[in-house]
Image (tube, rainbow, N blue to C red):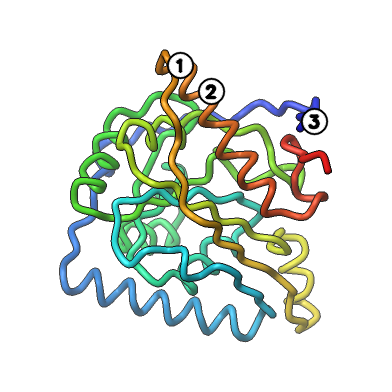
Amino acid sequence: MQKDEQVLSKPRSEVANPEIIRLAKLTWWRIAYRNLLRWFSKFLVLIWTRTRVVGLDNIPQIGPALIVANHLGDADFILGLAYSTSIVEPFAKIELYEIPVLGKILDAYGVIWVHRGQPDRRALRVVMEAMKQKRIVGIAPEGRESLTGALEEGTDGAAYLALKSDVPIIPVTFTGTENWRVFNNMKRFKRTEVTVTIGKPFRLEREDSLRQSIKLGTDTIMYTLARQLPEKYQGFYKVEN
């Protein structure tokens, strides 16, 4: 296996809003709201995509577990919501909270807001509490939507969370969900061919030091995602045949 030499700098949140970072309470109205969004997502997926889903039974009904996924476009969240068979607490960048309507929708769902590119201890505490409550947390280890249309270099957050909470990792990959592809097809009233692949759960091994464990854990996560993707989507983690 050999990494692509291209390295892109990662974004850093310039908005500070720690007071909104909390674990959502699963009240009856929030559960009903999440189910409503799920059915609406299923409707959008049905009319705008032709989706092939593989490995759906690899997602457990309850946690604790950590879902890691590549991030190609806006449709990733909708597909994940439509095909999730359990309640998932997804990460979302703090900047989205400021966007009218969208910020309110995500906050009502109960996403885990996070400041990107910096240690976010409050978000970490939220994740630890979610794991104690046997929930499933979702994170994009690239730290953003891919700028290249393929896997970018992974950040250490996902590996750190998996090691800290000692939970299984579920790898999820998307293809065909790039914004340019989906939105161009929508303008032509054409459905987009997309895939969702859910791999088998795995755990990270601990090394002599935490730093080494995180480094190797990040590579393990990213190469696992790469193996689930066609070559053109493997990017920084191209897998040699």
Residue 4 got which mark? 3
Is the C-beta separation of discs 3 and 1 under 8 Å? no
* Residue 153 lies in quadrant: top right
At label 2, counting other C-alpha atoms closer than 10 Å, the crowd grade (few under 14, some 14-19, many 20 or more) is some
Q: Amino acid at mark 2?
A: Lys
Residue 215 got which mark? 2
* Residue plotted at (46% across, 37% down): 158
* Residue plotted at (76% across, 32% down): 1
Q: Is residue 98 visible?
A: no
223 or 127: which is nearer to us? Answer: 223
At label 3, counting other C-alpha atoms closer than 10 Å, the crowd grade (few under 14, some 14-19, many 20 or more) is some
Is the C-beta separation of discs 2 and 1 under 8 Å? yes
For label 1, the SS is: helix
Q: Is residue 219 visible?
A: yes
Relative to 150, residue 184 above or below: below
Q: In the rendered view of the protein, which quadrant contains the C terminus?
A: top right
Q: Earlier in the sequence, mark 3 or mark 1?
A: 3
Percent across and percent down for residue 74 are 60, 60
Q: CA distance from mark 3 to mark 2?
A: 17 Å
For label 2, the SS is: helix
Q: Amino acid at mark 1?
A: Arg
Percent across and percent down for residue 193 are 74, 74
Residue at mark 1: 211
Q: Amino acid at mark 3?
A: Asp
Q: How many marks?
A: 3
Percent across and percent down for residue 68 are 50, 48
Q: Is residue 187 left or right of residue 111?
A: right
